[in-house]
Image: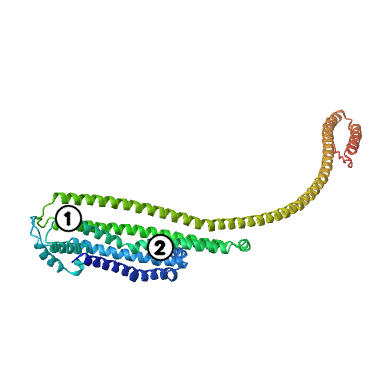
Amino acid sequence: MNATTSGAANGGRRTKTTMAAFLVGLPMAAAVLAGVHFGAAHLTAVQDLEHYISNPVECVEVVLFCCAISALAAKVLRSRIERRACRVNVLPSWDGRPVPIAEAAKLLASVQKMPARLRNTFLGQRLIAVLEFLRQRGAADDLDDQLRTLADNDVVSMEGGFALTRFITWAIPILGFLGTVLGITTAIHGATPEVLEKSLSAVTDGLSYAFDATALALALTMITMFISFLVERDEQGVLDAVDRMVDRCLAHRFQRVGADAGPFAQAVQQNTHALLESMGQLVQRQAEVWSATVAEMDKRSEAVHAAPREQFIGSVQQALELALTAHAQKLSAMEGKSLERTGKLVETMASLAAAVRDTGREQQAALVRVAEGVAAQAGVLGRLQEGETNLVHLQAVLHQNLAALANASSFDQAVHSLTAAIHLLTSRTAAQSGGSPPTLRLGKVA
């Protein structure tokens, strides 16, 4: 088993992940879209979700997201198998003392007898590759370098397994930006003054399409990146477990008979340092090139989006100015009508106030006349009360006179005098009150 066979196994794992992404992701995406558009449409949450998955670009974003989730789910299942393989004793027990290199062939035969599900794991492929290297070389002097190389190859293979997921993670925001451009284009295409004067829905629908596509793309990208991070950490943990197990079982298991040649080892070490420095410089230069490329792409993207954005802002400003002008004209017309109606109302109120003022004056004059009549009646009543008081006093005097006359035996003369006095008093009282004179009836005096 050589590096070519290990690469073929890694390629098989990547192929299975890709197949899972499409064989599971596409039906899952179809089920999600059908459930949103034709499922429980009466639910408020489903209605809100349907608003974000109503355009072709958004549907494609959902399909890519489901494919990425399916690929990551396949990797999670594969990681579970890898961890179970790390818990299985695939090699015979070792007492810690180095064994001859010839034991590598026996161990390789025992490993190759394992089930296929264990042989195709990172641990199985690593063990087979190490034992095959020892069997072919017949010595364990270069085993440490081989272990590091195999570990690096597995890391590269693991990173290559995320190629599809990284592509989808890159493609979903691009689709969101595409939806934004299409939505803004649709809004600008329908943003004519006539349409804006009648209804703003032609502009708002395009903007809603643009912003919904971008919002959905960013949300799905964040979810995909987070899940990819977790899965990648999980697979990195699997590779760490494989490294520890291989180092514990094979790194010091075999005898090493070769000795380090001083000059040769020093030369190799110098060459290694030089190679590492060159690799570091190459990586740094590549990082600088990537940074410059990304900055240039950002500038171009900003330049591409600046012109449509300015055009859209100018169209919206023009539409708003037209709408404000029409609104100001309507307000002026309404203000003129309001002033006219207010003037008529003021005239009506003035005539009503004049009528009320005239009526009040008439009522005031009538009240004055009534008050004068009441005052005259009060004077007459006062004079009547005064005459009544005099009459009561005269009656008392009359009684006294009658008593005196009765005692003096001159009653007849007193009666005639009294009668004359009463008639005189009565005539005066009648003259003052304006009524008929009262009739006095004198009783017989005993």
Q: Quadrant of the C terminus?
A: top right
Q: Quadrant of the N terminus?
A: bottom left
Residue 446 in view, yes or no: no
Q: Quadrant of residue 196?
A: bottom right
Q: Position of residue 211 (x, y in %)?
A: 48, 59
Q: Position of residue 263 (x, y in %)?
A: 16, 49
Q: Nearer the viewer, residue 89 or 343?
A: 89
Q: Amino acid at mark 2?
A: Ala
Q: Is residue 80 left or right of residue 430?
A: left
Q: Quadrant of residue 228?
A: bottom left
Q: Residues within 10 Å of mark 2 (few under 14, many from 20)?
A: some
Q: Quadrant of residue 314?
A: bottom right
Residue in the picture at 38% in, 64% down: 65
Q: Nearer the viewer, residue 285 or 297?
A: 285
Q: Are marks 1 and 2 in contact (CB under 8 Å)?
A: no
- Colouring scheme applied when the structure was drawn: rainbow
Q: Nearer the viewer, residue 40 or 263?
A: 263
Q: Is residue 151 left or right of residue 429?
A: left
Q: Residues within 10 Å of mark 1 (few under 14, many from 20)?
A: some
Q: Secondary structure at mark 1?
A: helix
Front disc: 1 or 2: 1
Q: Residue tagged by mark 1? A: 144
Which badge, 1 or 2, is on the more N-terminal residue? 1
Q: Position of residue 280 (x, y in %)?
A: 30, 51
Q: Position of residue 174 (x, y in %)?
A: 43, 61
Give residue 171's mark. 2
Please tell me how many numbered marks the rendered image carries.
2
Q: Is residue 63 left or right of residue 15?
A: right
Q: Amino acid at mark 1?
A: Asp
Q: Secondary structure at mark 2?
A: helix
